[in-house]
Amino acid sequence: MSQPIPVNTPLLNGNELKYVTECIETGWISSEGPFIAQFEQKLSAEVGRVHGIAVSNGSAALDIAVKALGIGTGDEVILPAFTIISPAQSIVSAGATPALVDTDPNTWNMDVNQIASKITSKTKAILVVHIYGFPVDMDPVLALCKEHNLFLIEDAAEMHGQTYKGKKCGSFGDISTFSFYPNKHITTGEGGMVLCNDDAIAERCRKLRNLAFEAGRRFVHKEIGWNYRMTNLQAALGLAQLERLDQHILRKREIGKRYLNGLKDLKGFELPKESVSYADNIYWVFGLIGETQASTERMIGYLTKKKIGTRPFFWCMHEQPVFQQMGFFKNEKYPEAERIARNGFYIPSGLGLTNEEIDIVIYTLLHA
Ligand SMILES: *Cc1c(COP(=O)(O)O)cnc(C)c1O
């Protein structure tokens, strides 16, 4: 009987131990340590942004991004119906109203052709979320932002190293965010970053990250912020991971292609596309979509029995009990988003996965 294959295993085989050891030997373990500024500078340079503001996680980065742009009560923000809750939660927590668009079945991202119909006089921003492997089709989004004078927020948590028409994900719009959760392309355990080009917005982000401390008398506050600071230990991991980003991306694409090739004869499940006109898949996770909810659940059950980790796809925002209770999205329907949320799941996709493990997963799927 083979060993369990977890849905994610991180890869920490570069300078991680060396840099973390340095934190411990020097005593720099808090957010005051020297690795934080280095990590911020290296990552923002890599993405092509002026400023990077390291924070405690990717959801915190989104909270800061929304608030730093001054989005609040009375404002509307357009985002995909199919996403992790983090971006929607940041909008709602800021007092603004989320407006949803359905999914493009080719990329599983927001269908950009449906954005225009959601723009009202209250719309303040479009929040794009690049999901699972492909970037959102950015050109139409950029055109709408320009035409209607809207902010653009880019949740690039899953897209480190990915490009849209050759331009780095995380470099679009007014502000962008990354997560460094252990299943992302680079990890700090928990962690995130806000990126922008504008000096004043960057200053706002730094302030909101740090309890909104004022420049003058310490401990006197004029507004509410958060303690969303990253520690030096996290930044140490991040620096080491960033040194290996190119290898990580190559490996992600190898894993994706090995699965695609091995599963091409799998019946009853839709597989991710290898590329679209504006990007090659980066396979943050390798998702499959069954024909029915029942066939999907059967397959997940079989893989679980065989000790192969899976995750169901995200659950739609308009179907979240918490948002329904708050009165959002009454009677709204997003059929594509609902279909992939119900019938989609992903298989082990982490950077620590070996080819032998991939082949076991393929064999198991083909013999279910
Ligand atoms: C992982 C992720 C987040 C949240 O990041 P955390 O660091 O887990 O808070 C936000 N958005 C997307 C698209 C993600 O994949």
Image (cartoon, helix red, strand yellow):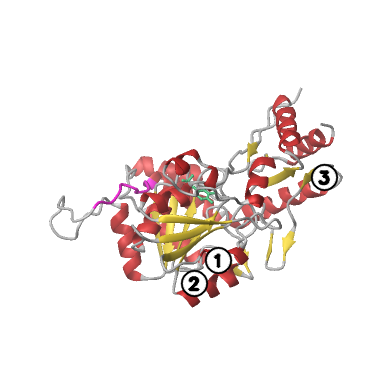
Residue 96 x %, y %: 38, 56
Amino acid bearing label 2 = Cys
Q: Which mark is residue 117?
A: 1
Magenta segment's dominant SS is loop
Q: Secondary structure at mark 2?
A: helix
The quadrant of the picture occupied by the C terminus is top right
Structural crowding at the residue carrying mark 2, measured as other residues with C-alpha within 10 Å and reported as few (<14), some (14–19) or many (≥20): some
Structural crowding at the residue carrying mark 3, measured as other residues with C-alpha within 10 Å and reported as few (<14), some (14–19) or many (≥20): some
Return the residue at label 2. 145
Q: Magenta segment: does it hold 227? A: yes
Return the residue at label 3. 262
Structural crowding at the residue carrying mark 1, measured as other residues with C-alpha within 10 Å and reported as few (<14), some (14–19) or many (≥20): few
Q: Secondary structure at mark 1?
A: helix
How far is mark 2 from mark 1, CA to CA? 13 Å
Amino acid bearing label 3 = Gly
Please state which of the two labelled residues, at mark 3 or mark 1, is closer to the viewer.
1
The residue depicted at 51 percent of the width and 47 percent of the height is: 187
